[in-house]
Amino acid sequence: MDAVHHRSGHRATMREAPLSSAATTAYFGVSIGEGDADAVTFSAEDAARPFLTEDESMWTFFAPELRRRLAEIEAPATTADRGRAALHECLPAGGSSINAVAAQLITSPRTLQRQLQVEGTSYQAVLTGTREKLARRYLADKSLTVAQIAYLLAYDDTNSFYRAFRSWTGATPESVRAGV
């Protein structure tokens, strides 16, 4: 690999670096050299500067969820906790089956069922509880339609979501959203 081009701790490398051009040099502040990985390294001075796109309101929005997820990681996780975390990943991609969650947890569906049974729960209970909790959270976000929420929760159609939501709450998603 070629020597890495740098300016006072700042460098850019690519496994297959493009031919040097004024545009890429102007953009990165250095010419791109070949290296073992695609990477941009900032000087210590640059790394200490605030991001130009720093947005306190976005941080305020995301920070509680990030703290919650960090707490989940740090706490000893039960199989149900790990299943719920996997569902947070699988549901928006359309995966609500035990097979999808077991694959995410790198275990077999049978082992997952057995471990949940030892904890006094079932896969269906974890799935239902996770969907209900997420549905309530999503309904608080007025920018999401009920159809979008149904999709994010991996329901085949909006009517299936309505029926499930009514069984959990005795109310419609719209009435819960409206605070009725």
Image (cartoon, rainbow, N blue to C red):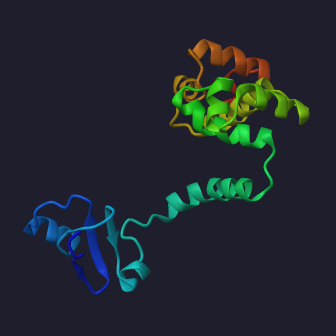
Q: Quadrant of the C terminus?
A: top right
- Count of number-bearing discs: 0
User: Based on the displayed image, in which of its 4 quarters is residue 61 positioned?
Assistant: bottom right
Is the residue 85 above or below the residue 64 in the image?
Answer: above
Q: Nearer the viewer, residue 23 or 12?
A: 12
Q: Nearer the viewer, residue 82 or 62?
A: 82
Q: Horizontal placement of 90 versus 31: left or right?
A: right
Q: Horizontal placement of 99 versus 76: left or right?
A: left
User: Based on the displayed image, in which of its 4 quarters is residue 38 positioned?
Assistant: bottom left
Is the residue 73 above or below the residue 121 in the image?
Answer: below
Q: Horizontal placement of 112 versus 56: left or right?
A: right
Residue at (69% x, 20% y) in the render: 172
Q: Nearer the viewer, residue 128 or 39?
A: 39
Q: Nearer the viewer, residue 44 or 169?
A: 44
- Looking at the picture, how far across and down is residue 104, in whole percent? 62, 37
In the displayed orientation, state which residue is furthest to the left. Answer: 22
Residue at (19% x, 75% y) in the render: 30
Q: Horizontal placement of 29 versus 134: left or right?
A: left
- Looking at the picture, how far across and down is residue 154, in whole percent? 58, 24
> Can the viewer see residue 180?
no
Q: Quadrant of the N terminus?
A: bottom left
Is the residue 122 above or below the residue 45 in the image?
Answer: above
> Can the viewer see residue 156?
yes
In the displayed orientation, state which residue is furthest to the front. Answer: 1
Is the residue 20 above or below the residue 160 in the image?
Answer: below
- Looking at the picture, how far across and down is residue 115, in whole percent? 83, 34
- Looking at the picture, how far across and down is residue 129, in whole percent? 77, 31
